[in-house]
Image (tube, coloured by chain):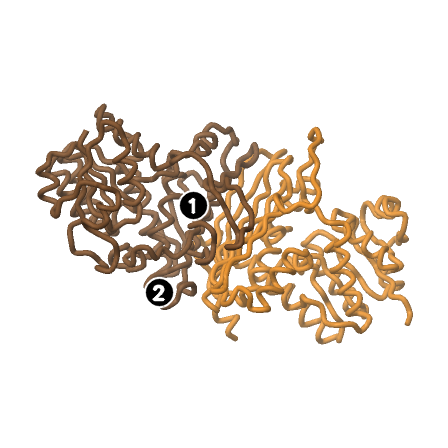
Amino acid sequence: MKELRIGLVGAGVISYAHMPALLALGKEVLVFSEVGAPELVAAHGGGTVVDSFDELLARVDVVDVATPTFTHAEYVEKALRAGKDVISEKPLARTDGDARRLVDLAAELGRTLYPAQVVRFFPEYAALQRAVAAGDLGELAVLRFTRSGAFPTRSPWFADVEQSGGIILDQMVHDLDIARWLAGEVATVSAVSRSAGTLDEPVQAAHVLLTHTSGAVSQVSGTWGPQHLAFTTSFSVSGTGGTLSHDSGTERGFSTDLPPAAGTGGLIPDIDPAESPYYVELAEFIAAFEGGPTPRVSAADGAAAVRLGNAALESLRTGQPVSLREEVMA
Amino acid sequence: MKVGVLSFAHVHAYGYVPRLLATPGVEVLTTDPTPWSDPSELRGRNFADQFGAPYVETLEELLAWGPDCVVITSENSRHREFVEAAAAAGVHVLCEKPFATTLEDAEAMRKAVADAGIIFMMAFPVRFSSSFARLRATDLGEVLTIRGANNGKLPTARSWFTDPELAGGGALADHVVHIADLLDALRGVPAASVTATTNAILHTGVARAETAGLLNITYADGVVAAVDCSWSLPDTAPNWGGLTLNVTGTRGGADVDFFGAAVRGVTTAGSAELRYGADLDAAMLTTFLDGVRTGVQPQPDLEVGMRTLQIVLAAQESARTGRTVTV
């Protein structure tokens, strides 16, 4: 079988997580980015820079869109229309309409589209999901998720809610997806949020409450804190069969006690290099493109996560819970 | 000093009675007037006898003894009748949480206490933790976000805990107030609005109220708090539960696990968790008795009880209506 050629679009933080995984999978990687492509290739000692997105489309089989949120829809649509299978960084799109349109377009064109909801591939969340699916926790009742790190100040678009969806759509979309993965469709969404700090050192936090159609309830808390704040995540999930919890801050196979380095706050969690979730994720998607099993996350899941995030943003605006009951029952 | 204990309905009487008996200079008299919610539970003179605590049958006899103060450990819905009786007798009160089960009762209690001019303190022991003192002393910058979880097993030692009439609800009434008290003491900012969602999936058939509850609270200064008050700890857990708090501001974050310190291991009986830490109930009782002795109102006072109850009532209304509710 002909080896798939992968076109990576964008050269930001996520591309630095995807690139080594794609190279480790033995793929030929072509990179297009408005900025930073040569540095990305140089840093990994692999991949080829191309000068335009059109050139990329002409030379690859699969497109991995790892650009800022507000540009996902445009790149994904062009790639699908060019006949490519597509991986899109999360969130699948900035708006619900775009996300749904991309899901429909992929189906219409007979292409596959996978959203990089990478937390489903983190071993602790995967273990939790297997336990829930096996019925170890019985009927789920109450789920709690937290995610904290430094405010992403390296690019101005993160701070612009119109472009990024803010902390809810950029960061908390991971746990919104996990909550729905575990406890099913969501009937109501409500959210509160707070921003503080300065222009140079902004901070932002939000809490989102979900009531699932099953009756289970979830709480997702996100913090973009000061620049030194370590990246940590936690969950606690309880059902009629018991409770499972995890805290990335304490469950560590390797830790150091060294003088603090400047700007050590995290945007990307500490990962076990032997079990990189980015590698597992991309391997699963690429295997599916090559005829392998269906991945654990679908384009529709990606659109549903976007919908939850945008419903939370709507709740912030109105100050009241938002009902999704009619759409999820439809 | 003469200290009365009114009712053994609340399980915390198990903690307070022996501690009071062991306090030098304190004389104790107890009573547990009927009606009892469940006659099969250890109550009344039998309860007092296990500690060797002096006991009388009626509230009238206890008040006729001339106590300086009383500790009220009744069912939540009966706080009002005991507080009104103590206030009428001019006796200072330490009252178990939550303050009351309805706003009407709470307002009547506030009036009775004000009219009598007695000291009234709420029994919120967690704020007496040294970890809380350290949290208060930590400069986190401008506070941004708070997460609090007070999770435990389904309270089964007393059946009224899961009777919404006597308890004033379920997990919301039982557990939200502890975190609300800590945030009240930490920041002194009132809650502005509450959104809550609940269910009764856990302990179906045993509990008669919500067993899981999640809240978003927005405070008057814009700080947002996420609270989990669920009775979500399985019966097989090695301890009753716990309380954790994360506070994050512009300078960074602080995590407090109030009951987290433990020696851990595995024995033939299963997982073992030998908790340690200072006695919060003793510190709280000492603060109350000092207040009674000196006449200086200790904290948490009645208004803390009122504010924490208002958050619970707003959460209950939110869970019922599906709306965000102004406190």
* Res A252 → quadrant: top right
- What residue type is disc 1 on? Thr
Shade of chain B as shown in the rendered figure: brown
Q: Earlier in the sequence, mark 2 or mark 1?
A: 2
Quick one: SS at disc 1? strand
Disc 2 is attached to a residue of which chain?
B
Q: Quadrant of the N terminus of chain B?
A: top left
Residue B140 located left or right of residue A2:
left
- What residue type is disc 2 on? Val
Q: Nearer the viewer, residue A149 or A272?
A: A272
Residue A166 on image: x %, y %: 59, 49
> Marks 2 and 1: which is nearer the front?
2
Whether label 2 touches label 1, CB < 8 Å: no
Q: Residues within 10 Å of mark 1 (few under 14, many from 20)?
A: many
Disc 1 is attached to a residue of which chain?
B
Which residue is drawn at the image coordinates 28% and 54% (left, top)? B167
Q: Is residue A313 visible?
A: no
Residue A217 on image: x %, y %: 47, 60
Which residue is drawn at the image coordinates 50% and 39% (left, top)? B261
Tell me the residue that label 1 is attached to: B218
User: Which chain: orange?
Assistant: A
Residue A46 on image: x %, y %: 90, 51
Q: CA distance from mark 2 to mark 1?
A: 33 Å
Tell me the residue that label 2 is attached to: B206
* Res B109 → quadrant: top left
Q: Nearer the viewer, residue A195 or A73?
A: A195
Q: Residue furthest front?
A: B268
Q: Does mark 1 fall on the same chain as mark 2?
A: yes
Residue B205 on image: x %, y %: 36, 68
